[in-house]
Amino acid sequence: MNAGLVHLEAGGTSLVLDARGDGLPAVLHWGGALGDQDQADLSALADAVSRQTPPATLDSAWQLSLIPLEADGWSGRPGLQVSRGGVEVRTRWQLLELTSDDAACVVVAADADAGLRLRTRVEVAESGLVWVSHTLHNVSDDPALLAVDWLEATLPVPTSTTHATTLDGRWSREKRPVTSRIAAGATTRTSRRGRPGHDAPTFVLLSEGLPQWNTGRSWGTHAAWPADVTYRVDRVTDAVTLIGAGELLRPGEVALAPGDEYAAPSVAFAYSASGLDGIAARFHTWLRARPHHPSTPRPFTLNTWEAVYFDHDPQKIEQLVARASELGVERFVLDDGWFRGRRDDTTSLGDWEVDEDVWPNGLRPLADRVRSFGMQFGLWVEPEMISLDSELARSHSDWLLHDPRHLDHDPALSWRTQFVLDLAEPAAYAHILQRLDALIDEIGIDYLKWDHNRDLTEAVHAGRPGTHAHTRAVLRLIAELKSRHPGLEIESCSSGGARTDLGILDVTDRVWASDSNDPVERLDIQRWTGLLLPPELIGAHVGPTTSHSSGRTTDLSFRMAVSLMGSAGIEWDILSCTAEETATLARFAALYRELRPLMHNAVVSHRDLRDPAWRVTSFTAPDGSAAAVVIATLAGLEDARPERLRLSGLDPRRRYRVAVREELGTPKAGWVIPPWLSSGGIVLSGAALTEVGLQLPALWPMQGIVLHLTALR
């Protein structure tokens, strides 16, 4: 079949495929939009980027196909690796069908000798985000199972790229950027934790020069999968550079019988000519266009964890409810410690029954009390986990997702004294679904904080590696609960930010970015989480004066400024607050409610300033009519007179009133206090704010200012 040349374009992004041959289409271009291109234009483009003229002998691939293979002359990592009986199956695809419109195409190919059929969908979304999805079918009559080692999505990028950026981190300090020169050869970065992990790569991003927030061309990819993943970069000397991602599978984890199929997780690819902010804008726009993206205002939330921990005293918690209502809290979440026998973190996971010794009348009276104040009621659960000291484990020890040969005598399998429940086991799945379904009805739950506090270690299901099957079951379980309870919202918490990918967000409504509420750590955690997710999906709470995770003491104004940049709330014993702190928190809640329509629909940008102490994040209305800007400092400033702050996204023809929002209190500043700060505001044109900027004050370390810009005409 000769399908010709295909040009897909949307949202400022073009993808050009060459399907003139018999095999899988080759990718000629992925990047900036090309505009109208007829077949003659596309043919000339193909000639312009080709490395060789047929019938010359090939030493390497002419152009990289949607699944580059060794049979194509590709010397990098294959896009697909499968085997039967321990022997690699070498595939040579024959194109059977290609259908396309302006922004999407579906490719169907087969290898009759290998008994395989492939369906690939490539779509350029209206946001400019490119999605690639592969499904492999075993159509062979051979009874031997087809083992899938990997099936990854890849796209080429220019060899002019010089640096690669991924993320790293640890508990309470997630999303640490790691940038290095692109390594020679085929390299991979993997996560093998059964969840992406606190050190998850999250993406791989290639840039021309060091990555900048506002400028420069970048190409990035993200696997929408909440478990084990592989990110890859191939820089071989005789082909263009390649990036990609896919699910990491253990040997034998996916083995297809005749008639079976494997649908690889979808992979997103983002191109930007305007730095990292441009990459983020593509993801944010795509997420906000989803039919199930949260459409109601994101509630100001109070979570009880750092207020009471496991000490559930109903009287104190009811006092917290009343005080939360006075502050303007809209969602009250009861955290860990509510279920039978749960006085610490060593027992009872899996026994999802309300503890009658603590709550003799159950939790329905508390939930009704919460709702009587006009607040939603939320509850913490960890359905994927089980404690050996639990009724469920004593009744069903065969439901654990661990190697049964080692479970009894290998204490290393324990993590936080908990184990993993195998939700791919139908009986375990049915039990947890029934119990959660009943809890939601019995109590009247509006919101579940769904935690996942350990890695999966030696995950075994039905005698084979079990992470894939378990993860698919988790996604089905969450989707089923939401289907049964319309309006139920679920937060993805994984001991903080260990599961914040687009796969889990297909069925959840928010992520908990980190267990650290230390604003110094949070500034960069939220900034880099925001490369993928818009602020309304990122939980960000005001914690205690001294952080429980770092021991650092910070001003309340600074903690509130950082919380304002996400889906805001409180995680603090507010009964211990002074009268002044209580009044300030109430003002902060009102400010959040006022600004969230702007900030949760905004174009988010970050100003690259020379002094690394600064963190500046702007939230600008798409039409440029308003903006909120959070200015913060992490350390002492380098210069006696700080630099100017130039803003972006404003209409140069309009005049803007720039007001300092004083609800957070007066920031501490030293020897430079410009008039616009001390007088409470200024009026300037968009052109002046963009080209000249504002003189920054000499803020002390760990200070924050919130600016509110409104257009006057």
Image (tube, rainbow, N blue to C red):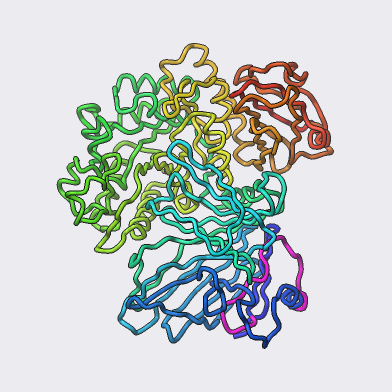
Could you say which is closer to the camera, residue 405 or residue 631? 405
Compared with 638, 132 (above or below) is: below
Residue 127 lies, in percent from the top left, at: 64, 55
Q: Is residue 37 magenta?
A: yes
Kindly identify the residue that appears in the image at 55 percent across and 36 percent down. 566
Residue 617 lies, in percent from the top left, at: 65, 35
Residue 663 lies, in percent from the top left, at: 61, 20
Q: Quadrant of the N terminus?
A: bottom right
Q: Splitting the image into 4 quarters, where does residue 524 fall?
A: top right
Region rendered in magenta: 20-41
Q: Splitting the image into 4 quarters, where does residue 475 fall?
A: bottom left
Residue placed farthest to the left in the image? Answer: 395
Is residue 426 in view? yes
Relative side of 589 to 157, left or right: left
Is residue 437 in view? no
Labels in figure, total: 0
Q: Quadrant of the C terminus?
A: top right
Could you say which is closer to the camera, residue 286 or residue 59? 59
Kindly identify the residue that appears in the image at 67 percent across and 63 percent down. 159
Compared with 300, 103 (above or below) is: below
Compared with 555, 495 (above or below) is: below
Relative side of 405 to 267, left or right: left
Could you say which is closer to the camera, residue 371 or residue 231? 231
Kindly identify the residue that appears in the image at 68 percent across and 70 percent down. 7
Relative side of 230 to 3, left or right: left
Q: Is residue 645 magenta?
A: no
Residue placed farthest to the top in the image? Answer: 579
